[in-house]
Image: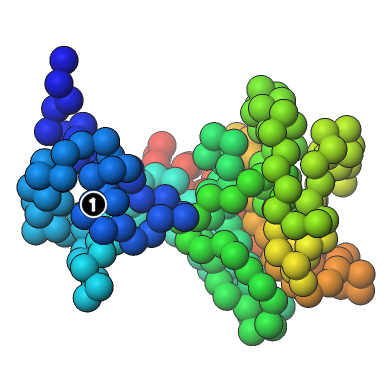
Amino acid sequence: MSASVTSRALNLLGAFDPDHRSLTLSDLARRAGMPIATAHRLVGELHRWGALARLDSGEYVIGRRLWDLGLLAPVQAGLRQAASPFLHDLYGATLATVHLAVRDGTEALYIDRLSGHVSVPVVSKIGSRLPMHATGVGKVLLAYGPDQVLAEVLGNLTRVTAYTITQPARLLEQIRRVRADGYATTGEEMSLGACSVAVPVRGPGGEVVAALGIVVPELRRDKARLVAALRVAAQGITRTLTDSASAQWK
C-alpha cells in the first residue's frame, strides 16, 4: 500500500536531525525515500505553511512554526515554565552554562539551556539529543530510568572523546554511585575542556522527570557548591510542579 500524503510529509520532516540541520531538496528526497518531484511538491506546501524555511543558499531548515508548536508540548510547556526561574537563578549565581534535560529513548533531550559566560566548549543546544552515558544529565536520567533502557545503553557505549566511558562495568558502577549520592559528574567525556555535574528533578509523585546540570571547566574546587546550588534549584522546580498539579485538582 502506498504511503499517505501525511506520512510522506512527516518523512520529509524526519529527514532532519542534529547532524543534518539544513538539507537541499535532493537531500530531502533521498533521505525521505521519495521521488524528487514528489518531494518538491510537498516541500513547497510545508514551506508555505511555515514548517520549513528556505535559506539563501537554497537549503531548507525546520521552520519557526514547528518550533512554536513544539513549545506547546507538555514536556516543554509545563516543565520548562516551572524550571525557568530556577535556571536563571543558577545562571546568575554561577555564570555557567545550565541545562535542563529529559530522557527520550536512549538519549538525553535538552529542553532548555542558558549559555554561561565562562569559555567552555558546550555541544548541546535546545532540542538536541546527546548520548546519556557521556553527559551529566544523561547519567542522572540513566540512574533513575527503566532498567531496560540502562541495559540498552550499556550494550552500545560509543566513544565521543578519549575520556568517554565505554566499559559497561565502569559505567554501571558510576550509575550506582549516582543513585547513592544523588548527583552525577563527567570529566571531558562529551567535550574536551568541559566537565559537568547534574542532579535529578522530581515530579509531584516523587518520580524523576528531568535532570538539571551545569557545565564548567573543572569540578575539583567547586563541586560541593555546585551540587548544593543544583539541589536547591531542583527542589524549587519540584515545589512549582507540585503546586501546579495541586491547583489543577482544586
| Image position of 2 (left or right of 91) | left
Q: Quadrant of the C terminus?
A: top left
Residue at (84%, 38%) from the top-left corner?
A: 167
Residue 5 picture location, percent across and down: 12, 33
Looking at the picture, tell me which residue is in the foreground, 46 or 202. Answer: 46
Residue at (74%, 31%) from the top-left corner?
A: 154
Q: Is residue 73 above or below residue 114?
A: above
Residue at (52%, 39%) from the top-left corner?
A: 104
Q: Quadrant of the N terminus?
A: top left
Q: Amino acid at mark 1?
A: Ser
| Image position of 136 (left or right of 223) | left
Residue 171 picture location, percent across and down: 83, 39
Residue at (48%, 42%) from the top-left corner?
A: 246
**Residue at mark 1:** 26
Residue 239 picture location, percent across and down: 59, 52
| Local secondary structure at mark 1 | helix
Q: Is residue 215 above or below residue 105?
A: below
Q: Is residue 189 above or below residue 157?
A: below
Q: Which colour scheme appears in the figure?
A: rainbow
**The quadrant where residue 98 appears:** bottom right
Residue 210 picture location, percent across and down: 60, 47
**The quadrant where residue 193 appears:** bottom right
Q: Is residue 82 visible?
A: no
Q: Is residue 51 visible?
A: yes
